[in-house]
Image (cartoon, rainbow, N blue to C red):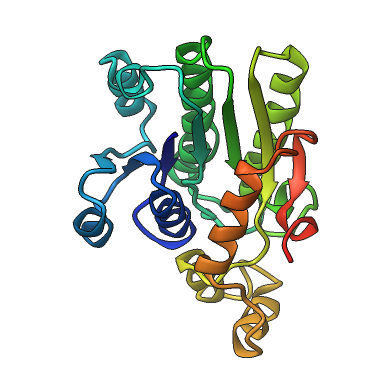
């Protein structure tokens, strides 16, 4: 079993990578930073590539190098977990940083779509190949101040649904909302001024009341779903519908 995980170095991505490695999977992690702890504990199973996927040119150059296809050689089960993403820019429409918009689209949309297409093309001979987009409830419900984040996550949902219509042989794909998790993204949301995000106090309350799920718990649940027999039966799901 082989898996590619983006944004694997911290938070939910690190937790999902840890779970896969504990199952004996060979994992290729793509992120701006390296996770030294995971590398030290799984030296024979984990490969890491330091890459800034916000700029599509970086990812295209890496894909053109053949590294992805090389990792995916052989006909064993293979998985792609598109986890990397950013919530910024946050704020009312018309006030957003233009570079921030481009960065969000680059990481949240362009990168996962590039990787998914390359992955599907490189694994046409595999009988069991799976793609998991880490989406968000924000892709299915609009939030004031999150126009960019909501739009980019909705893009992942529609990509998964459309690819499923193509019916590639052996491919299962699903865009999975993970719920609200205690990660750095939540820190960013709570530190946003209320005039930029009117629901900020609601997210502060989630932290103060202990209502956030740990990355480890949710990471285990996400991987359990990815490996389940019914993964991909619906291309758009919420993990909380499957978690115990």
Q: Is residue 127 visible?
A: yes
- Please, is residue 205 above or below residue 101 in the view? below
Q: Quadrant of residue 234?
A: top right
For the residue pair 20 and 37, the one nearer the viewer reads as 20
The quarter of the rendered structure image containing the C terminus is: bottom right
Q: Quadrant of residue 184?
A: bottom left
| Residue ranking furthest to the bottom | 209
- Please, is residue 103 above or below residue 202 in the view? above
Q: How many marks?
A: 0
Q: Is residue 150 visible?
A: no
Q: Quadrant of residue 169?
A: top right
The quarter of the rendered structure image containing the N terminus is: top left
Residue 59, given in percent of the width and then of the height, sits at 35, 27
- Please, is residue 6 above or below residue 18 in the view? above
Residue ID at (73%, 22%): 164
Residue ID at (48%, 42%): 98
Residue 41, given in percent of the width and then of the height, sits at 24, 59
For the residue pair 2 and 59, the one nearer the viewer reads as 2
Residue ID at (50%, 64%): 185
Q: Along the horizontal axis of the image, is 230 left or right of 188?
A: right
Residue ID at (26%, 42%): 48
Residue 191, given in percent of the width and then of the height, sits at 50, 75
């Amino acid at each position: 079993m082989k898996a590619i995980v983006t944004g694997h170095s911290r938070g939910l991505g690190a937790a999902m990578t840890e779970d896969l490695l504990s199952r004996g999977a060979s994992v290729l992690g793509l992120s701006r930073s390296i996770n030294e702890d995971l590398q030290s504990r799984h030296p024979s199973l984990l490969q890491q590539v330091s890459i800034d996927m916000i700029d599509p040119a970086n990812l295209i150059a890496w894909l053109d190098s053949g590294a992805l296809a090389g990792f995916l050689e052989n006909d064993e089960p293979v998985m792609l977990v598109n986890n990397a993403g950013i919530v910024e820019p946050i704020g009312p429409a018309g006030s957003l940083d233009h570079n921030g918009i481009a960065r969000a689209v680059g990481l949240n949309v362009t990168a996962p779509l590039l990787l998914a297409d390359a992955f599907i093309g490189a694994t046409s001979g595999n009988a069991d190949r799976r793609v998991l987009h880490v989406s968000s409830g924000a892709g299915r419900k609009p939030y004031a101040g999150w126009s960019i984040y909501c739009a980019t996550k909705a893009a992942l949902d529609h990509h998964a649904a459309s690819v499923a219509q193509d019916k590639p042989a052996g491919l299962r794909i699903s865009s999975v909302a993970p719920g609200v998790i205690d990660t750095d993204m939540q820190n960013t949301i709570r530190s946003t001024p209320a005039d930029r995000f009117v629901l900020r106090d609601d997210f502060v309350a989630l932290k103060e009341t202990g209502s956030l799920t740990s990355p480890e718990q949710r990471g285990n649940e996400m991987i359990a779903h990815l490996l389940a027999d019914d993964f991909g039966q619906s291309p758009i799901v919420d993990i909380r519908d499957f978690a115990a």
